[in-house]
Amino acid sequence: MLTPLEPGMHVRHPDRPDWGIGQVQSVIGDRVTVNFEHAGKLLINAAQIALDIVENPR
């Protein structure tokens, strides 16, 4: 079972580790806005990309 993403959670993009850790800003359906350390604020389609949840961010 997948854990639903919620604002405030920390995540990583599995294909873009260079983006660093991101914090979920909003979730509307499959559209997840994430503010990444090294890539800024990006809109991710969660139906296509399964973001990895970071339990203990730095």
Image (spheres, rainbow, N blue to C red):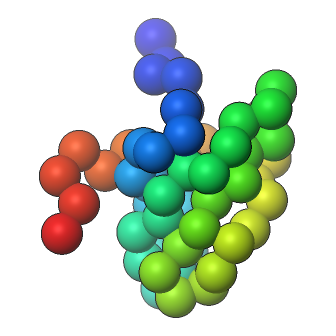
49 and 41: which is toward the camera: 41
**Residue visible at 69% across and 72% down in the picture:** 41
- Measured along the vertical axis of the image, is residue 33 above or below residue 41? above
Q: Could you say which quadrant of the image residue 7 lies in?
A: top right
**Residue visible at 71% across and 54% down in the picture:** 33
- Measured along the vertical axis of the image, is residue 23 above or below residue 20? above
Q: Answer whether residue 14 is visible to the viewer in this image.
A: no
Q: Answer whether residue 19 is visible to the viewer in this image.
A: yes
Measured as percent of width and height from the top left, residue 51 is found at 54, 48
- Measured along the vertical axis of the image, is residue 36 above or below residue 31? below
- Measured along the vertical axis of the image, is residue 58 above or below residue 53? below
Q: Tally the marks.
A: 0
Quadrant including the C terminus: bottom left
Task: Judge left or right: residue 49 versus residue 53.
Answer: right
Task: Judge left or right: residue 44 versus residue 8.
Answer: right
Task: Judge left or right: residue 50 versus residue 28.
Answer: left
Measured as percent of width and height from the top left, residue 55 is found at 23, 44
**Residue visible at 81% across and 41% down in the picture:** 31
Measured as percent of width and height from the top left, residue 23 is found at 48, 58
**Residue visible at 82% across and 26% down in the picture:** 29
